[in-house]
Amino acid sequence: MNAPAATAIERRLAISGGEPVFVEPLHVGRPNVGDRARLHRRLDGVLDRGWLTNHGPCEREFEARLAEHSGVRHCLAVANATLGLQMTMMALGVRGEVLMPAFTFIATPHAARLAGLTPVFCDVLPGCPQVDPADVARKITPRTSAILGVHVYGQCCDVDALAAIAREHDLGLIFDAAHAFGCSYGGRAVGGFGEAEVFSFHATKFANAFEGGAIATNNDALADRLRALRDFGIEASGRNVCLGMNAKLSEIHAAMGLTSLEAMDEIIAANRRNAQAYREDLADVPGIELIAPVDPQQQNAQYVVIRVREEEFGLSADTLQRVLRAENILARRYFSPGCHRLAPYAGDDGTAATPLPNTETLSRDVLALPTGTAVGSKQIDAIASLIHASRQRASQINMRGEE
Ligand SMILES: *Cc1c(COP(=O)(O)O)cnc(C)c1O
């Protein structure tokens, strides 16, 4: 085993009373801002025009760039991905039950519930963050009308298998691609799979518009319905044609989104460098396995996620998170617990209606580590040294925890 730096081994861990390694906190998902001067120029343009929202030039340009990047005919900018998902299910006329993984952010089932649907949770594949298509097929009932796949950590779920199930049972197929802008599957950009895919441009996501999202689709009729739905039910001619909401993206958000897109190549390069550094530094730590990104060439590598196997590593993911937090390394438990254990989908005590054994194991073991343009290889080396040191002192750390 690669000996960790002597300094890291000899110093006291912060959880045992030592000084934290980092003075400033290191975060997962610091915003990727891009060129500030360009952002300021765009904002001046917005104010000079006095056109602040309602499909202004920044929003249109943002939509055009998104459609181009993801190779789809339509990309509708929306206020956020949660509304985007809800609208897509409404516009597709989805009814009854929607199959989706429980290993996702809570916004995925909320969007379905807000659209008046019942989320039905499916398990993930063993040791893998993606939904198990066999479990999706097993959970189909006469009330099922759609599958909502999630590209967790920007790694695509099994799009082909889900598409085959959807075809066979005549179900709608939508993807929550909140993590997956700039990712691809089998060499094809995310955006064109299923009937629609929904991106998020929330501040913590790969590309950011402060808040924002987009619905990508190649279906012209669906795009028209979504445009009306986004805008109080008013269609392009100005006529009110259906029930609608307000899910428009303002110019200021679109200006940020455009600026962030311009920095994409740089952000991806930094993310991939970081992922590679983590991979090398953690390769020989027993019980630690990098589960994202698995294929950095097809991913935006926005999330670096490890699985902590307690039997081998000596500490649980939860305890390792506390050790790292004491050092100002703000690792996150994406996604723990699974949505099936959260309100309003679980009992008050977190009991799940459906047993999802692989989801339980995975959510017990995952830990997302800091990455992005604000993190560099020196910091990653220090984080990895701390993980090495934590393993060596696992029994002391566990004893303290029980005091
Ligand atoms: C962030 C996120 C969402 C919600 O996106 P918003 O734009 O914040 O509404 C939905 N699904 C997943 C998997 C997410 O991570």
Image (spheres, helix red, strand yellow):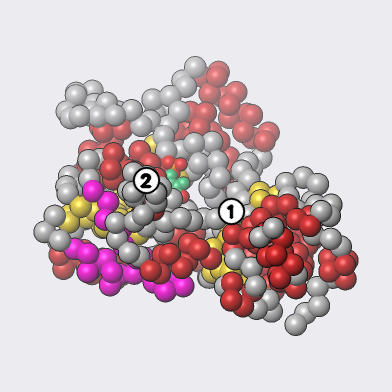
Is 239 in front, or is 318?
A: 318
Question: Is the residue marked 1 within 8 Å of ligand 1, measured from its CB?
Answer: no
Is 163 in front, or is 86?
A: 86
106 vs 385, left or right, is left
- Residue at image position (46%, 72%) is 127
- Residue at image position (51%, 19%) is 49
Q: Residues within 10 Å of mark 2 (few under 14, many from 20)?
A: few
Quadrant of the drawing holding the N terminus: bottom right
Please give the residue where the numbered disc 2 appears in the rendered image. 348
- Residue at image position (46%, 68%) is 361
Q: Residues within 10 Å of mark 1 (few under 14, many from 20)?
A: many
Please give the residue where the numbered disc 1 appears in the rendered image. 332
Q: Is residue 149 magenta?
A: no
Residue range corresponding to the magenta coloring? 118-140
- Residue at image position (50%, 63%) is 364
Q: Can residue 175 be seen in this view?
A: yes
| Discs 2, 1 touching: Cβ within 8 Å | no
Q: How far apart are marks 2 and 1 (CA)?
A: 24 Å
Q: Identify residue type, mark 2.
A: Asp
- Where residue 30 sits in the image (x, y, percent)? 63, 45
Q: Does the magenta stretch include residue 120?
A: yes
Q: What element carries label 2?
A: loop
Q: Identify residue type, mark 1.
A: Arg
- Where residue 368 sits in the image (x, y, percent)? 58, 58
Q: Can residue 384 be seen in this view?
A: no
Is 355 in front, or is 371?
A: 355
336 vs 280, left or right, is left
- Where residue 271 sits in the image (x, y, percent)? 63, 59
Is 388 in front, or is 18?
A: 18
14 vs 258, left or right, is right
